[in-house]
Amino acid sequence: MNLDDFARLGRLHPLVLHLPIGLVFAVFVLELLALRGIKTRPAQGPLLVLAALFAVAAASSGWILGHEDGYGGESLERHERLGIAVAVATTVAALLFRRAERSPLATGLYRVALATALALLVPTGHLGAGLTHGEDWLDGPRKRAKPAPVAPAPVVVAETPSASEGTPAPVAEPAPAQVLPDTYATVIEPILAAYCTNCHGTGKHKGDLRLHSPEAILAGGESGPALVAGDLEQSLLHARAVLPLEHEDHMPPEGKAQPSADELAALAAWIRAGAPFTGHVELGVEVAPPPAPVEEATGSVPDEAVAPPAQQAKSAAPSAPPAELLAALDAAFVHHESLPGEEHALWLDVAAVAPTFDGATFARLVVPLAPWTVELSLARAPLDDAALAALSAFSRLRKLDLRATRLTTTGLAALRGHARLSELVLSQTALDDGALDVLLSLPALHKLTAWKSGLSGEALARLASERPGLVVVGAESAAVALESEGELAFTSDRPLPGFEDIPAEKRPINTKCPVSDSPVNPKYTVLHEGRVIGFCCPNCPGQFEAEPAKFAEKLK
């Protein structure tokens, strides 16, 4: 067995870890029944042996798995020690079971070992769930961040002489200016906690990357720097989050909860501003800030009022597209399909009815579905800038096809600064070079199709230089000939096919039949006035000889 085969044994851990849990619990229940006089001994023995074997297998495979890259920390070490303890306690209980039938002391020790194994399963399972799903897995639904009580700002009273009595009168001085909260602590850190730190935190750090603290973020991981202040493309923390969902490097992975467009925009604005871990940054986007706490009669604060921003953003997201809107698409023959890997994400395509899909239809059928639309194809629909201005409401868009619409640079401005748009098709539109500013404002743009879009070669060259990672398809450029053929020269010196073996004195003087104007076949000739005349078939010589003067002009 080589090292790879040995490491592969660790991957068996998720398959076997649940078996000892169920078996130990089953033996414990049977032991309780035995105390009530019910005969359960014949079943307990085999179950205990299986529980011991699977507990040892789970502890061993877990220990191997814990030595893979991406795992580590105090939680893992505690989980490993407790897992070994469960295996030991279960094995001891299995060994004492047979003796328990003959010795009261062995019976007591057996029951202690069994109870110990069952008790150890609780913290072991809790730590294991924390390594896989996050440290607050068990109490996550009830856990809320409680804000520290804020004492009211004191009002300083100064005394000034009274105009009438000359006695001091209290004057309230203005309270100090409000200090804005740290953007990292109130916006960025909750986003990372919601989507990243389960796999890149204290207990689990895939790719040797941790994102639970400023120091860990700045340290980066195996793939490079997670954060480069002021540079979005070099900051993998943002660059991988805006890749297409199906891309192998997209983070979070497909099937996991994905950050919203507003959350990605906030992350991008924070990085552009230098990614400060202290101080306030104007993000230019609202990321569902927590509402002001509402004091109830008991003085307590409702849990909903203090939910983290990332959690509030998810709770504010639409649950599912209304069935009546989808039914209207079906009735209008507009294709719609749910996309895998992202909750309530739609792909809409108007190809079947594109020629008649005007602005009014777009506003009635598609615009109401903006909160759910992730991929949208409006190709060949007669939509102008006024209709396409509604695209500004489609914050979840990743792919957009506007090919052969009536789009101009004015209408494209509706997409300015879109945080998630990664693929854009603008072929056969009426843009100009002014559209370049809008395209440069799209931080997630990964692929652009610009064939006959109106963008000049100079504009596309500038776009390529400023966005080196952008793939531009259909950019028109001057073609350079790799090789050219010389000028063709035609000559009549070469004989027609079939004439090569005919002596020169017997070759027809003509290449076309004077009767039919078809190519001459050298098999059919006549001698007329000392000249050999050729024909295309055996029928033409007779017609020629009957009226030679009729064809004389063609033989000159």
Image (tube, helix red, strand yellow):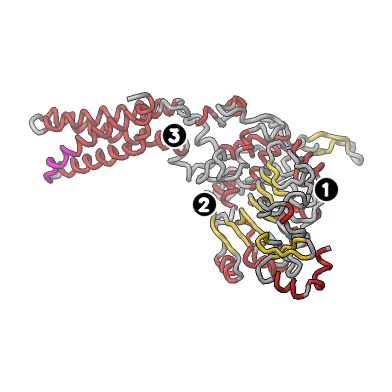
Residue 393: in magenta span: no
Mark carried by residue 535? none
Q: Based on the displayed image, in which of its 4 quarters is residue 464 positioned?
A: top right
Q: Residue at x 39, y 36 (%)?
A: 126
Task: Measuring from the top left, give residue 530's x and y in whole percent.
Answer: 78, 61
Task: State the extent of the magenta-drawn residues as a range.
Answer: 38-46
- Residue closer to the observer: 257 or 524: 524
* Label 3 – label 2 distance at C-alpha: 26 Å
Q: Which kind of residue does numbered mark 2 sit on?
A: Pro
Q: Is residue 98 left or right of residue 411?
A: left
Q: Residue at x 65, y 37 (%)?
A: 151
Task: Measuring from the top left, give residue 534's x and y in whole percent.
Answer: 72, 63
Name the quarter where the C terminus is drawn: bottom right
The residue mark sitting in front, 2 or 1, is 1
Which residue in the structure is indicated by mark 2?
340
Q: Residues within 10 Å of mark 2 (few under 14, many from 20)?
A: few
Which residue in the structure is indicated by mark 1?
434
Q: Earlier in the sequence, mark 3 or mark 2?
A: 3
